[in-house]
Amino acid sequence: MPPIANNLPSTAPPLDFALNARRDARRLGLLPLVCVMYLVVSGGAYGLEDAVHLAGPRLTLLLCLIVPLTLSIPTALMAAELTALMPVEGGFYFWVKAGMGPFAGFAEAYLTILYTAMDMAIYPVLFAGYLSFIVPLGPLAQIAIGIVLVWLSGLMNFLGVRPVGFASIALAGVLIAPFFALVVLGMPELIHFRMPAIPLFGADAWGALGAGLTVVIWNFSGWENLSVVSGEIENPRRNYLRAIMIALPVIVAGYVLPLAISISGAASVADWGTGSFSHVGYRIGGTILGGALAIGGAVMSFAVFAAAMLWVSRMPYVLARERYLPKSLTEIWASTVTPGKSILLCCVVFTMLVPVGFVALVVLDVFFYMAALALEMAALIRLRRLMPNREGLFTVGGGVAGLALVTALPVMTWVATFGLAISSGAGKPDFILAVVLGVCVWPAYSICRRRYGGPPAIDPPPTSLTD
């Protein structure tokens, strides 16, 4: 039976033994992996403020309890099973390619690039924006600081995966500490929690639910993203699942507890928005806690950007290995064992976006992410049939019913989100733009394949796993 490696591009430049040894010595261990995963998925409760403003406090709290069950847990289980099955550099791209074919694999990468471009363009701007609340900054200074953040994150990635991992440990601690203090000092509010006076649904119930659900999904997504750097993770078949089991409850608690304390007994959320957790900190813990939460907003922007750069910067490298992009992007820098030119390309692209002040619409971001996730779920089902022998590997339990539940719940959540957005009217233009950009995947695939050759055909397809 052909091994999984047959799904990898035969044209990729081989790594010599010395380079492999250096890569083994620089792999990401469990604790750094947990911290990077925390930053990639969450980065703290920052971001929920807009959901409270749009959907109301009661509905936001309810969604923060439901979405982990319908999206986070199913996605995490899918990612754990497929990472155990195929722990390769490129992760979810190769899952989809192996299960659904070359075009589906390209579509997965295309959709990923769309939603990450939106995400990554906003973080430098957010960083400068949060910093301007502490130190007054003009527009040019904010642009300059945003560009510095891009290249500082790029430099960390040039140095390799381990520096990013170690930095993520420190940054995750900086982000968790203020919210931990908020929870400790606000424990009386939690023990004597009072439901906000604002009703669950207002006049525009469908619009509020659609907007709130979209923002909460954005805050709880990304569990499979680090599979792109599986080749740089220490024992990914075991540690990816372990990291998920540690990070998931921390992230859920990190959203629900500060939110519950902040909205307890709230009579109005009209003034809620970016920085609202800082105001709650001032009320509960004084200037020190309020200031720490304000600084945390800037730190969050940098930390999430640096952690996301770790996997985003590997996508051009993977596509170049698959012969969809120039071969020069496959070059591995021997000194740091990183795809240097791929990282450099990402830094250049994000630098060009910063001066534009590009603020990604969450509707578009979630649409492309959930479309890519639907392909991954389809690959999960298909690979169960193609490669049934999983002895010693983690698989989602529950047989056919468990598999159906894990794959159906995220898709149903996605459909509900955009059905509500369309019905409310406000999301129609964004939804139409998302569909148009999504359809463009076919001409993009044709152009890249014709120009660079595309991956060789896999015949026959893989039917078993060999190490």
Image (cartoon, rainbow, N blue to C red):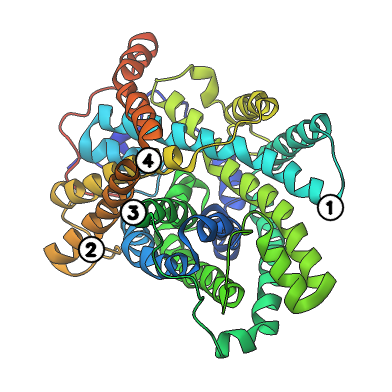
Instruction: Check contact, mark 3 vs mark 4: CB within 8 A.
Output: no
Which numbered disc flags the more N-terminal residue, 1 or 2? 1
Instruction: Mark 2: give few (<14), some (14-19) or many (20+) Cα within 10 Å.
Output: few
Percent position of residue 329, x then y: 54, 23
Q: Is residue 361 left or right of residue 381?
A: right
* Foreground tag (3 vs 1): 3
What residue is shown with label 2? 391
Whole-number angstrom distance, CA of label 2 to CA of label 3: 46 Å
The residue sitting at 21% across, 36% down in the picture is 100
Measured along the vertical axis of the image, is residue 192 above or below residue 15? below
Whole-number angstrom distance, CA of label 1 to CA of label 2: 55 Å
- Secondary structure at badge 1 equals helix
Relative depth, front residue between 449 and 442 = 442
What residue is shown with label 3? 206
Whole-number angstrom distance, CA of label 3 to CA of label 1: 37 Å
Percent position of residue 431, x then y: 35, 34
Instruction: Check contact, mark 2 vs mark 3: CB within 8 A.
Output: no
* Foreground tag (1 vs 2): 1
Which numbered disc flags the more N-terminal residue, 2 or 4? 4
Kindly indicate the quadrant of the structure image that contains residue 322. Answer: top left
Q: Amino acid at mark 2?
A: Glu
Measured along the vertical axis of the image, is residue 235 above or below residue 325? below
Which numbered disc flags the more N-terminal residue, 2 or 3? 3
* Foreground tag (2 vs 4): 4
Q: Amino acid at mark 4?
A: Phe
Which numbered disc flags the more N-terminal residue, 3 or 4? 3
